[in-house]
Image (cartoon, rainbow, N blue to C red):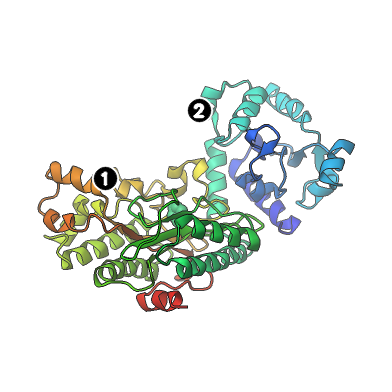
Amino acid sequence: MFDAKVYTDRRNRLRKEVKSGLVLIFGNPEASFNYPANTYHFRQDSNFLYFFGLDHPDLAGVMDIDENKDYIFGNDVDLDDIIWMGPQPLMSEQAAKVGVGDTAPLNALFEKVKEAKSQGRKVHFVPPYRGETYIQLENLLGIPVADLRNHTSEELIKGIVKLRSIKDEYEIIEMEKAVDIAYEMHTTSMRMAMPGVVEREIAGTIEGISLGMGGPVSFPIILSIHGETLHNHYHGNVLKEGRMMVTDAGAETVSHYASDITRTVPVGGRFNQCQKDIYEIVLEANMTTIEATKPGIANRELHMMAAKVIASGLKEMGLMKGNVDDAVKEGAHAMFFPHGLGHMLGLDVHDMEGLGENYVGYDDDIKRSEQFGTAFLRLGRKHQPGFVFTIEPGIYFIPALIDKWRNEKKFLDFINYDKVETFKDFGGIRIEDDILVTETSYRVLGTPIPKTVSDVEETMSF
Ligand code: GLY
Ligand code: MN
Ligand code: MN
């Protein structure tokens, strides 16, 4: 948790954005796993963490903007709770740590909201994403679950996005820690990537590193010798020489800031020539776009830059052909690079995605493309100092996509399908880093994680 002043300042800035009414920010309740009392690992809501800081279930934060007062609603523990959970500070003591002077039991929230509604004041809330929160909001506001998303507050969403997009010095320290945990996870994964090992042995080991050094992983680990499946959560394959292994994994710090890193390595520790050729193209796309990062450049421009590096590298290898600029303009590269260059990163691994991707990644100047591939870019707008985002280009050979486009005779001027056929069992490569936009340029967060061919081979050699 940060100093109380950090939370008070954040709420005061949000107040200026939303201007009037009651802001309601629910913390998360526990979520049951396989029977009611057996719960998933508790994860607090990120907006609640950002504005109200407290990290346990069954809390609600309210900012009464008209009254210029903040409240935390939550219950003090009773003797039964103390027997099971141990003694806990009073709600008033906890609230004071985040600069909130007024607390009340959770059921008093009904009165507070009822009073505001009867006065004709707006109750601002963001899109819910947990079933429990949908039900709480329905009970509280009398809006049916199915209709709740039509009543969310655009002023609140935009205000939160404006604040959370710019990371302060305290947050950046946390995010560096998250990448440093990922350093340990990824270098361990590299060293374990030897023939005969089962993917889950590596995935389990590196998840343990995250838990031991901070919090849980920031999203379910993607680790596979079938990297062509972008979010592959199956960890049952046995590693074989000749395959590449993709590890896309990050950690949460104790304070819940995330990292999100991908490395791709040759099983056994030595790249063959073909792997090296494709790898060098992805690496060039990664490094060229990192080096071009600065305030004012649109992330969509970086995405298109990566697409051109990829298309021109694939043309040199004879997998693509024709004019590179035209190929990228028409979207032919997306057969090999069918996702976006990256996304915001912060308390959420896809930061603030729950508020609506277009609010986070786009604005009045830059609207989302509708073209296959570029349409999946989560962050298109111009960079500002304080943004933290990922750069994660990739090249994949996805047999089903290759077959479909070939049958449709798509982009025959730009794709050399006969050669592509010979790569159908290649898999995929992605290289992902976490980048801070500084006042004039950029900084790659954390201890550098090996990514050149020679650094990866050296790391894997002992
Ligand atoms: N961890 C999924 C992604 O890279 O966005
Ligand atoms: Mn990732
Ligand atoms: Mn990512």
Image quadrant where residue 266 sits:
bottom left
**Residue 307 coordinates in the image, percent (x, y):** 27, 59
Q: Where is 178 relative to 348, above or below? A: below
> In this view, which residue lies farthest toward the front?
196
Q: Name the residue under label 1.
A: 371
Q: Residue at x 35, y 53 (%)?
A: 340
**Which of the four quarters of the rendered structure image does ligand 2 lie in?**
bottom left
Q: Where is 182 relative to 85, above or below? A: below
**Residue 294 coordinates in the image, percent (x, y):** 42, 67
Q: Mark 2 points at which residue?
A: 150
**Residue 187 coordinates in the image, percent (x, y):** 49, 70
Q: Where is 135 relative to 444, above or below? A: above
Q: What element carries label 1?
A: loop
**304 on left or right of 184:** left
The quadrant the N terminus occupies is bottom right
The amino acid sitting under disc 1 is Gln
Near-viewer residue (195 or 235): 195
The amino acid sitting under disc 2 is Asn
Confirm whether residue 344 shows in the render: no
